[in-house]
Amino acid sequence: MNIYINTKYDIKKMKIASYIAKSVLEMIKPYVVPNITTQELNDICHEYIINKHNALPACLGYHGFPKSTCISVNEIICHGIPNKKKKLQNGDIVNIDITIVKDKYYADTSKMFIVGQPSTLAKKLCKVAKKSLYITFPIIKPGMLLNKIGRTIQKYINKTPFSIVEEYCGHGIGKNMHEIPYILHYNNNKKIILQEGMIFTIEPIINAGTKNVISMEDGWSVRTQDYNLSAQYEHTILVNKKGCEILTKRTEEKIQNIYVNN
Ligand code: MF3
Ligand code: CO
Ligand code: CO
């Protein structure tokens, strides 16, 4: 199996899908406040994706996933199932992960929301998790070895008190939610060369304590083994002629859209 190289037409469609996905994260921001339930947040996103953008929430029914978004609070590292009993509280850190499909093309992005006043640790962890994603953008270009992404993240995280989850990875994305190549976020020796036209996600999960994780009884949520906090940011990224383009970049983010990397 070869890694798919997107055509001009594919890229146009992926930009539309990515715009919708990132718009969901922008739209939901004012709702992420104390006492709202993760079910209510899910329902607002669901309505917005369908009614405002005429797109579909791709998580709903994906391998049986029961909701339209993944919402993962505090020690939940990923795949949190929105739930009407789970109320957000002051100081919580919340990952909302949005995958949508528009005209058969998928886009996938997530970010952390901080509810009210966070602890110093929570703030630091989110900042480091975001930076671990951002530092990969200035290195991505055609001809580069894919494993440089994981090596770059590992080198950075090794200088912090935090750890990298190894069980989950970034992924190619296009006409499928998940496809090759898979992008490890830690030191590895996978020798794949990036080419112009590849599109994939990068989505490092960074833990405050141990990197070890445990799957929960609901069949989806995964938590840190030691119940310490976890944070994750995810973007969908196009490898272009001279570098890369962050397709799911939000207006609020103080980064470039397009990276020219020589
Ligand atoms: N958005 C997740 C990812 O980043 C995938 C969620 S699949 C679901 O790859 F079924 F859990 F929703
Ligand atoms: Co993803
Ligand atoms: Co995602």
Image (cartoon, rainbow, N blue to C red):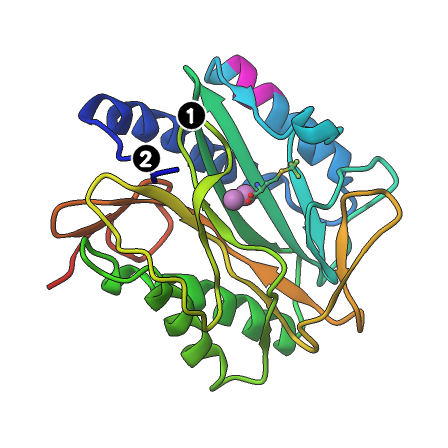
The N terminus, quarter of image: top left
The numbered mark at residue 175 is 1
Q: Residue sitting at 65 percent across and 28 percent down?
A: 62
* Residues at marks 2 and 1 touching, judged by CB atoms closer than 8 Å: yes
Residue 48 in magenta stretch: yes
Residue 143 in magenta stretch: no
- Pick the front one: 95 or 167: 167
> Which contiguous range is marked in magenta?
47-51
Position above or below: 86 against 68: below
Position above or below: 22 against 167: above
Left or right position of 162 against 153: right
Q: Residue sitting at 29 percent across and 59 percent down?
A: 137
| Mark 1 element type | loop
- Pick the front one: 216 or 182: 182
Left or right position of 232 against 244: right
Q: Which residue is mark 2?
A: 4
**Relative image position of residue 77 (x, y in whole percent):** 68, 57
**Relative image position of residue 128 (x, y in whole percent):** 49, 72
Task: Report how far apart the C-alphas of labels 2 and 1 lie in the structure.
Answer: 10 Å
| Mark 2 element type | loop
Q: Is the CB atom of the residue marked by disc 1 within 8 angstroms of ligand 2's nearest atom?
A: no
Which image quadrant is residue 223 in? bottom right
Amino acid residing under circle 1:
Lys
**Relative image position of residue 140 (x, y in whole percent):** 25, 58
Res 107 seen here: yes
Q: Residue sitting at 46 percent across and 46 percent down?
A: 171
The C terminus, quarter of image: bottom left
Magenta stretch, main secondary structure, is helix
